[in-house]
């Protein structure tokens, strides 16, 4: 397996706009590559996307593998998988990381199958095991009741997808330069099989939780849809966004796209208010990366207090309006 070298990150782009998770993975990939004393590379596919190469260097890649072809203008599984598989076979990276986005989830499965290697989906942690130098891939398992560490012992590359916002955003170094390698891939005429007729951008998408810097989240303890108005007021004063636990979503108090957690969105805000949320592991995996966690709960033994930066024991109906009034003054 020693012929496999280096860490690759798939740079996901749509119409020249790179998905931020790709930069987050370059940050994580940097640490892995340094631990392996290897190289970090970005692999960029698309049509006329060369202008993005300098961005990939700026976010820490030593090398960019660039595959350009008109057939890659819009994402379709078959040509993207074929191009990535060919590049992997030619250059043999030891590790290949993709964002756990809709595109990344689709592509990673097709690529892993074609390469006959393993794939750990939706990782929440990545590290190099010191003794074996294998990639330790951590993800929730058994309904989120355990955190499993998964190793790919016999096949290479070791492939993982990671959810957006799980890894911190690395700093960008303007003017940083690396190496560019063009990979030529020949596509068959009927390669794409599907034709993209039109791209419709969803309008009025309610929330972009994964990029929110201030989140005010409510759980079952909030008690009703009407009571969320108190949280909305606090969010309004702080310029924040509302969110919810699954219990609150299932009660119909907020729509599903507001759900934080294992089966919802992963968030990494500067500050996360957890109000009337007990702190089940399935909720924690989606928000424990927040810089500051403020928990409001009337049960002093609620598990959320174990990870909270600030804990306020009390009825949210008293605590939240007091917080809103105080922040309004500042
Ligand atoms: P509860 O656990 O019922 O907690 C309510 C809290 O409110 C309590 O701590 C209580 O003390 C407090 N409270 C009550 N009244 C007040 C008051 N007046 N003032 C202040 N505090 C008060 N959950 C998620 O959130 N996201 C997920 O993505 C997710 N995915 C899941 C996936 C699987 C496979 C499974 C099995 C479960 C998943 N869950 C998820 C559910 C999870 O296990 C919990 O059931 C859920 O998070 C509980 O939500 P909660 O904290 O709002 O409610």
Image (tube, grey):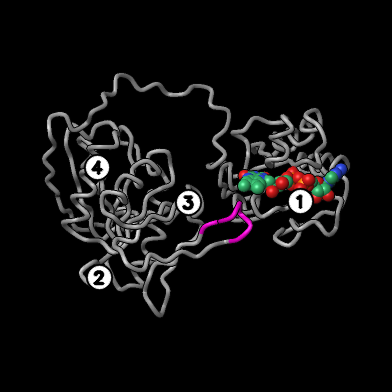
Q: Sequence-wise, which precedes: disc 2 or disc 3? A: 2
Q: Sequence-wise, which precedes: disc 4 or disc 3? A: 4
- Quadrant of residue 132 within the rendered picture: bottom left
Q: Sequence-wise, which precedes: disc 2 or disc 1? A: 2
Q: Residue at x 83, y 59 (%)?
A: 301
Q: CA distance from mark 2 to mark 3?
A: 25 Å
Residue 89: x and y in percent read: 19, 56
Cβ of mark 1 under 8 Å from ligand 1: the answer is yes
Circle nearer the viewer, 4 or 3: 3
Give the magenta-colored segment's residue range.
Answer: 139-146
Residue 188: x and y in percent read: 12, 34
Q: Residue 122's mark? A: 3
Circle nearer the viewer, 1 or 3: 3
Residue 151: x and y in percent read: 42, 66
Q: Is residue 196 above or below residue 325?
A: above
Q: Is residue 53 above or below residue 151?
A: above
Nearest to the observer: residue 194 or residue 127: 194
Disc 4 + disc 3, Cβ < 8 Å: no
Q: Residue at x 74, y 32 (%)?
A: 251
Q: Secondary structure at mark 1?
A: loop
Q: CA distance from mark 1 to mark 4?
A: 43 Å
Crowd rating for badge 1 (residues with CA inside 10 Å; few <14, some 14–19, many 20+): many
Cβ of mark 4 under 8 Å from ligand 1: the answer is no
Cβ of mark 2 under 8 Å from ligand 1: the answer is no
* Residue with the mark numbered 4: 45
Circle nearer the viewer, 1 or 4: 1
- Quadrant of residue 82 within the rendered picture: top left
What quarter of the picture does the N terminus occupy?
A: bottom left
* Residue with the mark numbered 1: 278
Can residue 22 be seen at all in this image of the molecule? yes
* Residue with the mark numbered 2: 1
Disc 2 + disc 4, Cβ < 8 Å: no
């Amino acid at each position: 397996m020693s012929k496999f070298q280096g860490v690759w990150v798939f740079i996901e782009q749509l119409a020249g706009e790179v998905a931020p998770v790709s930069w987050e993975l370059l940050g994580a990939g940097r640490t892995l590559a340094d631990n392996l004393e290897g190289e970090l590379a970005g692999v960029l596919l698309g049509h006329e996307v060369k202008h993005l190469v300098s961005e990939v260097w700026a976010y820490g890649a030593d090398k960019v593998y660039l595959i350009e072809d008109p057939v890659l203008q819009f994402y379709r599984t078959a040509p993207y998988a074929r191009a990535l598989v060919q590049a992997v076979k030619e250059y043999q990276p030891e590790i290949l990381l993709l964002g756990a986005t809709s595109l990344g989830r689709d592509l990673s499965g097709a690529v892993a199958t074609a390469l006959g290697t393993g794939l750990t989906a939706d990782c929440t942690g990545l590290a190099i095991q010191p003794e074996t130098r294998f990639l330790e891939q951590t993800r929730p398992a058994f309904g989120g009741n355990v955190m499993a560490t998964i190793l790919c012992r016999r096949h290479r590359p070791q492939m993982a997808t990671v959810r957006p916002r799980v890894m911190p955003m690395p700093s960008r170094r303007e003017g940083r330069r690396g190496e560019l390698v063009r990979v030529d891939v020949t596509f068959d005429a009927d390669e794409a099989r599907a034709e993209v007729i039109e791209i419709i951008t969803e309008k009025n998408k309610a929330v972009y939780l994964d990029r929110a810097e201030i989140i005010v989240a409510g759980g079952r303890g909030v008690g009703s849809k009407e009571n969320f108005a108190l949280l909305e007021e606090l969010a309004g004063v702080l310029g924040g966004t509302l969110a919810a636990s699954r219990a609150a979503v299932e009660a119909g108090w907020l729509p599903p796209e507001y759900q934080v957690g294992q089966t919802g969105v992963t968030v990494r805000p500067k500050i996360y208010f957890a109000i009337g949320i007990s702190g089940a592991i399935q909720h924690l995996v989606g928000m424990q990366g927040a810089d500051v966690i403020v928990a409001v709960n009337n049960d002093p033994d609620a598990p959320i207090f174990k990870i909270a930066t600030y804990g306020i024991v009390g009825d949210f109906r008293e605590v939240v309006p007091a917080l809103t009034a105080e922040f309004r003054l500042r």
